[in-house]
Image: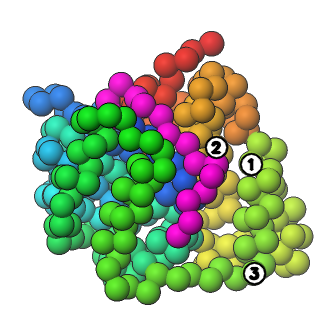
Amino acid sequence: MEIDPGMVAKVTRNGRIILWEGVSLWAFDVLPGKPPASNREHAHHAFQLTLAAGGEVGIRTAAGLVPGPVILIAPDVPHAIEAAGRIALLFVEPESRAGAGLRQLLQGAPIARLPDLPNREANLRGIWEGPPLIETTLIAVGMRLLERVLGSIIHGHALDPRIARVLDRLDQRVESGLTAAEAAGIACLSESRFSHLFVEQVGLPFRTFLLWRRLMRAVEQLARGKRLTEAAHHAGFADSAHFSRTFQRMFGLPAASLGLTSRED
């Protein structure tokens, strides 16, 4: 996997946020004795790899609590995070190569406690301690964690070229977006056939996936230092309130909890 030169990293009040192609790493510190801001049932589009990084973490679903230190949860599974101390979350888009490998690893299960990773805490400690890590080093940490989780699993994933064309065009038009009819035209399919194929290939309805991409674009703009309203508009949200509501729904915690909205208008 090559590092995208367009990736971004931001220091927040509690840790770091790093985004690169198809993956984002969120690292934060939950104060002892206080519930994390994310301790509310929610679901989101991405695979979520949850790791203790010097603290304790568990994921609660309708079936009960799955303890850490390493937990993988499938997309769109309602869950809540229960944590204290330092934890790290890796969000992986399902249509990425790493996402295909994580899907294979779960084998249809909604959530799994994974074997611990060698040097897990040591690999993550530098996010909080010592000289600030540069962006490429932080990305390397996230990539190394994914590689260790995936092990020898073959995680190549070749999208249908018609859907790949739509995703490429969407990358260029996140702000204005694409209608389902426009996307179907790019794929040279009827709208009904496109909708079926998109869900089959990506795992979500087209409109829901478009919302996810807009959310990630807004987070990227905030990490680059844009004001909240400017970042929301750049990503195609009607206003900052629309973005904030969407962030809460997709990640289960307010954007302000990680310092993303420190530059208000």
Which residues make up the magenta segment? Answer: 1-15
Q: Which residue lies at the image location 17% right of the left edge and 72% below the top edge?
A: 115
Q: Kindly identify the amino acid type of the residue bearing the numbered disc 1.
A: Val
Look at the numbered discs 1 and 2 and tell me whether their residues touch, using CB distance below 8 Å.
yes
Q: Kindly identify the amino acid type of the residue bearing the numbered disc 2.
A: Arg
How does the figure colour the protein chain or chains? rainbow
Mark number displayed over residue 55: none
Q: Is residue 195 left or right of residue 101?
A: right
Disc 3 crowd rating (10 Å Cα; few below 14, some 14-19, many 20+) is few
From this view, report whether residue 131 is shown above or below residue 19: above
* Rendered location of residue 31, percent (x, y): 18, 29
Whole-number angstrom distance, CA of label 1 to CA of label 3: 20 Å
Quarter containing the C terminus: top right
Check disc 2 and report the residue beneath it.
217
Q: Sequence order check: which comes first, mark 1 or mark 3?
A: 3
Whole-number angstrom distance, CA of label 1 to CA of label 2: 8 Å
Disc 1 crowd rating (10 Å Cα; few below 14, some 14-19, many 20+) is many
Q: Which residue lies at the image location 41% right of the left edge and 63% below the top edge?
A: 143
Check disc 1 and report the residue beneath it.
174
Q: Quadrant of residue 38?
A: top left
